[in-house]
Image (spheres, rainbow, N blue to C red):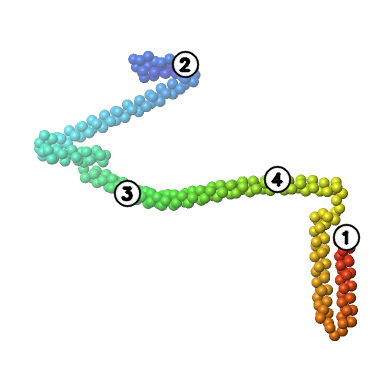
Amino acid sequence: MCEKIKKVNSWLSAVFGDQAVPQFEVNTRTVDILYQLAQSSEARCSDTALLIEDLKQKASEYQADGAHLQDVLLQGVGLSCASLSKPAADYLSALVDNAMVLGVRDTSLSSFMPAVNNLTNELLEAENSNRRLDRDIRALGKRLGATLVLRRNLQEDINKTVKSQSMDSAKAEERLLSMGFVTRKTKEFNDTRERAEAQLISRNMEKSITHQAIVQLSQEVTALKQEIIPLKKKLEPYMDLSPSPSLARVKIEEAKRELAEIDSQFEMNVDFK
C-alpha cells in the first residue's frame, strides 16, 4: 500500500509539475485507481518516447539519404538545387509532393506504379460502390414513392371511415332518441290502457264488449257471411222458375227456412257474446 502511495504521489507531482497537487481522499479504492492510471500513463509515455526515437532515427536516415543524393547529383551530373530552373524545381517539388501523398519510399518508377495501381483499384472500387449506392437509392426512391402513395390512400380511407363513423354516430343518436321517444310513448299507452282496463273492471264491464271480443265476433261474422254465399248461389237457379210455381215456392220456402235458421243461429251467437 505504501509503495502504491509513493508511486501515485510521484506520478501526480510529475503530471502537475509546478502546480500544487489537488487534495483527494486517501483510501484503498482511490489509491488503486490512481495507481492504475499512473501505470497506464507511464506505459503510454514509454510508447510515445519509443515512437519519437523511431521517427528521429528515420528522419536522420532520410536526411542522410538526401545528402547522399545531393552529393551524387552534384558530383555525377553537376546538378544542385540552386542550378535548377524554376520549372524543373516546380516539377521536382510536385514529384516529391506526389511521393508523399502516395506514401512511397522513393520517387522511382517501381515505387510509383504499385501506388498508382492501388489508387486505381481503390477508384474502381469506389465507382462500383457508388453505382451500387445509386441503384439502392433509386430502389429506395421507388419504394418511398409507393409508400407515399399507399400512405395517401390509407389517409383517404381513414378520412372516409371517420366521416362514415360520424354519420353513423349521428344516425345512431337519432335512432336512440327515437327509440327513447317510442319507449316513453309505449309506456304511456300501456299505463293508459291499464288504467282504462282497471276503470272498466271497476265498473263491471262485460267481457263481450271488449276489443278482443269484438274482434273475435267480427271474425265469426265474416266466416258466417262466407258460409251464406254458397247458399245464395244455390238459390240463384230457382229464382227464375216459372213453369212450376208450386215447386218453386217449396224450394223457396226451404231456402228461406235454411236462411232463417242461419240468421237465428247468427243472432244467438251475437246475443251469447
Q: Residues within 10 Å of mark 3 (few under 14, many from 20)?
A: few
Q: Disc 2 designates what residue?
A: 25
What's under tag 1, amino acid-wise?
Asp
Q: Disc 1 designates what residue?
A: 271
Which picture quadrant has residue 46? top left
**What residue is rendered at 85% in x and 46% in y?**
202
Instruction: State the SS at label 2.
Output: loop
Q: Position of residue 119 (x, y in %)?
A: 28, 45
Instruction: State the SS at label 1.
Output: helix
Q: Is residue 10 visible?
A: no
Q: Is residue 149 left or right of residue 95?
A: right
**What residue is rendered at 24% in x and 43% in y?**
111
Instruction: State the SS at label 4.
Output: helix
Label whose residue precedes the other's in the sequence (2 or 3): 2
Q: Disc 4 designates what residue?
A: 184
Q: Nearer the viewer, mark 2 or mark 4?
A: 4
Q: Disc 3 designates what residue?
A: 127
Given residues 51 and 95, the one toward you in this image is: 95
Q: Nearer the viewer, mark 4 or mark 1?
A: 1
Q: Position of residue 211 (x, y in %)?
A: 80, 55
Q: Is residue 241 visible?
A: yes
Q: Is residue 175 left or right of residue 147?
A: right
Q: CA distance from mark 2 to mark 3?
A: 59 Å
**What residue is rendered at 35% in x and 15% in y?**
19
Q: CA distance from mark 1 to mark 3?
A: 115 Å
Q: Residues within 10 Å of mark 4 (few under 14, many from 20)?
A: few
Label whose residue precedes the other's in the sequence (2 or 4): 2
Q: CA distance from mark 2 to mark 4?
A: 86 Å
Instruction: State the SS at label 3.
Output: helix
Given residues 130 and 45, the one toward you in this image is: 130
Q: Is residue 123 above or below residue 15?
A: below
What's under tag 4, amino acid-wise?
Arg
